[in-house]
């Protein structure tokens, strides 16, 4: 079942913060985050494995609340290079496959 | 540098044609995937393979088949292309680690079916 991402799109000015949410109706054991810049392949950001665990990548961090079945991605002091579409992915029926959300388009303007 | 290579960046085919999309990875990964990406729908899994000659259906397998004869190569086949298969197709690979691991994606193949 496809996880639900919100918001669908967000526009920021450089230096502003943003939060992207990912939620599932099924129990979550891990959440993956990817970023895809325009015209490029999606690139892995991080995997969150445990409840409440946080990880960071550049000035991007994330939390995972397995009880609430959701994860949030935090982008702090956004840079122009953060622009792109962010996808969360959750493991499906198989151990190996990921089911992705529809994505959140983040635009950072000067 | 790890690499997933898709043979064609852009293809234009006619309705009813048979289409082959090829993907090669050089990381000795066990798992390979084909996703389809459409605006507003995100990345949807078509098929995946966790070993040579092994395959499993993803979320939208209808109208597609796959082949994995060698570990490094995973092909997506459209037996009879239709206009609703016009899309961006992304191949990915990952290592087996008991759980869904980091996916490495190719640059994508944009298919237009006329």
Image (tube, grey):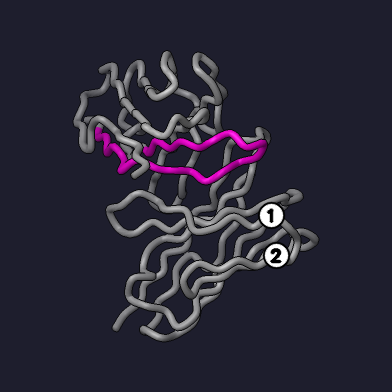
Furthest residue in direction right, as rendered: A67
Name the disc covering residue A53, or none: 2
Magenta-highlighted residues:
B90-112
Q: Residues within 10 Å of mark 2 (few under 14, many from 20)?
A: some
Q: Residues within 10 Å of mark 1 (few under 14, many from 20)?
A: some
**Left or right side of A57 for A43:** left
Disc count in the image?
A: 2
> Regarding mark 1 in the picture, which secondary structure is present there?
loop
What's the residue at 60%, 66% (across, down)?
Answer: A55
Marks 1,2: beta carbons within 8 A: yes
> Closer to the camera, A12 or B81?
A12
- Point out the image quarter for the N terminus of chain B: top left
Q: Measured from the top left, where is residue A100 in percent x and y?
A: 54, 48
Q: Is residue B105 magenta?
A: yes
Query: Do the residues at discs 1 and 2 belong to one chain?
Result: yes
Q: Chain of mark 1?
A: A
For the point 42% across and 79% down, the residue is A78
Q: Residue B54 falls in which quadrant of the image?
A: top right
- Protein chain holding label 2: A
- Give the side of residue A48 with respect to residue B50, left or right: right
Q: Position of residue B44 (x, y in %)?
A: 49, 40
Q: Write down the quadrant of residue B20 in the picture.
A: top left
On screen, B93 above or below B17? below
Residue highlighted by disc 1: A49
């Amino acid at each position: 079942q496809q996880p639900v991402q919100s918001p669908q799109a967000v526009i920021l000015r450089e230096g502003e913060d943003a939060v992207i949410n990912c939620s599932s109706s099924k129990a979550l054991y891990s959440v993956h985050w990817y970023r895809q810049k325009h015209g490029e392949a999606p690139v892995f950001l991080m995997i969150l494995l445990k409840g409440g665990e946080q990880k960071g990548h550049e000035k991007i961090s994330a939390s995972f609340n397995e009880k609430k079945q959701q994860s949030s991605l935090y982008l702090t002091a956004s840079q122009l290079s953060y622009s792109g579409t962010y996808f969360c992915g959750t493991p499906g029926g198989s151990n190996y496959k990921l089911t992705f959300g529809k994505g959140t388009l983040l635009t950072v303007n000067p | 540098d790890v690499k997933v290579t898709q043979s064609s960046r852009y293809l234009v085919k006619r309705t009813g044609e048979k289409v082959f999309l090829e993907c090669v990875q050089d990381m000795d990964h066990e798992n390979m995937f084909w996703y389809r990406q459409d605006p507003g729908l995100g990345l949807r899994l078509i098929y995946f393979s966790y070993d040579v000659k092994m395959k499993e259906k993803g979320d939208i397998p209808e109208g597609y088949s796959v082949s994995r004869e060698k570990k490094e190569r995973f092909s997506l086949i459209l037996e009879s292309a239709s206009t609703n298969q016009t899309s961006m197709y992304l191949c990915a690979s990952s290592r087996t680690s008991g759980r869904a691991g980091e996916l490495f994606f190719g640059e994508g193949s944009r298919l237009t079916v006329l």
